[in-house]
Image (spheres, grey):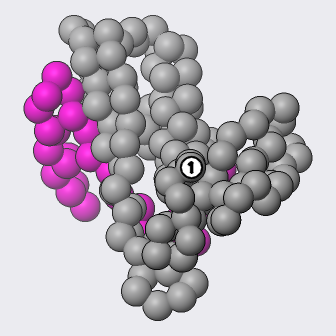
């Protein structure tokens, strides 16, 4: 994996990653012009992309097919610099029929605890939690059996 950025204008940089090019920019209050997302936001996108790919791959191996699937993250940021994420909530949204709750939960657990490297990196500095939404309905967390 190889990445670099090249200054283009103001606080805007052209990013290069594995043969792809994209713009990143800073917030307007520090000279950004809205020419691309901010780097910290891309970390959240990396998180949801990583876990989404894991979950859908695991579900397919379990022979669970979804009609629609999306993952989003909402993060709280520390007020003091370096303003790291303090808490992140990842929401997994599934659409479809015959979606066994136990398999959805297992796929998410495997991604979060074993496969998603981005999740593992972020867990070192932030509290990560998740919620599951199936066909628009939020699933309750399983009862603690301990």
In front of the other: 131 or 33: 33
In front of the other: 139 or 27: 27
Q: Where is residue 4 in the image (x, y as percent from the top left)?
A: 84, 53
Tell me which residue sits at (38%, 36%) in the image. 71
Q: What element carries label 1?
A: loop
Find residue 67 and report its image quarter.
Answer: top left
Tell me which residue sits at (54%, 37%) in the image. 49
Magenta stretch, residue numbers: 117-146
> Which image quarter holds the C terminus?
bottom left
Q: In the picture provided, is 38 more to the left or to the right than 100? A: right
Tell me which residue sits at (50%, 54%) in the image. 34
- Tally of numbered tags: 1
In front of the other: 106 or 111: 111
Tell whether position 134 is magenta. yes
Q: In the picture provided, is 56 more to the left or to the right than 103? A: right
Q: In the picture provided, is 11 more to the left or to the right than 71? A: right
Q: In the picture provided, is 2 more to the left or to the right than 93? A: right
Tell me which residue sits at (74%, 48%) in the image. 14
- Residue that carries the numbered disc 1 in the rendered image: 35
**As displayed, is residue 53 above or below residue 84?**
above
- Residue neighbourhood size for the residue with mark 1, other residues' Cα within 10 Å, grouped as few (<14), some (14–19), many (≥20): some
Q: Position of residue 17 (x, y in %)?
A: 79, 41
Residue 118 visible to an observer of this rendering: no
Farthest residue to the right: give it: 2
> Which image quarter holds the N terminus?
top right
Residue 115 visible to an observer of this rendering: yes
């Amino acid at each position: 994996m190889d990445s670099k950025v090249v200054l283009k204008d103001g606080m805007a940089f052209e990013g290069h990653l594995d043969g792809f090019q994209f713009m990143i920019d800073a917030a307007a209050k520090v000279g950004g012009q809205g020419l691309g997302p901010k780097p910290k936001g891309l970390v959240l996108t990396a998180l949801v992309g990583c876990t989404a790919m894991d979950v859908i791959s695991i579900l397919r191996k379990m022979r669970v097919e979804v009609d629609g699937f999306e993952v989003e993250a909402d993060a709280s940021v520390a007020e003091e610099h370096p303003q790291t994420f303090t808490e992140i909530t990842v929401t997994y949204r599934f659409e479809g029929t015959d979606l066994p709750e136990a398999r959805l939960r297992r796929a998410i657990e495997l991604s979060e605890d074993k496969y998603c490297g981005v999740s593992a990196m972020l867990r070192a500095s932030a509290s990560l939690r998740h919620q599951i939404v199936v066909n628009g309905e939020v699933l309750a967390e399983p009862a603690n059996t301990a």
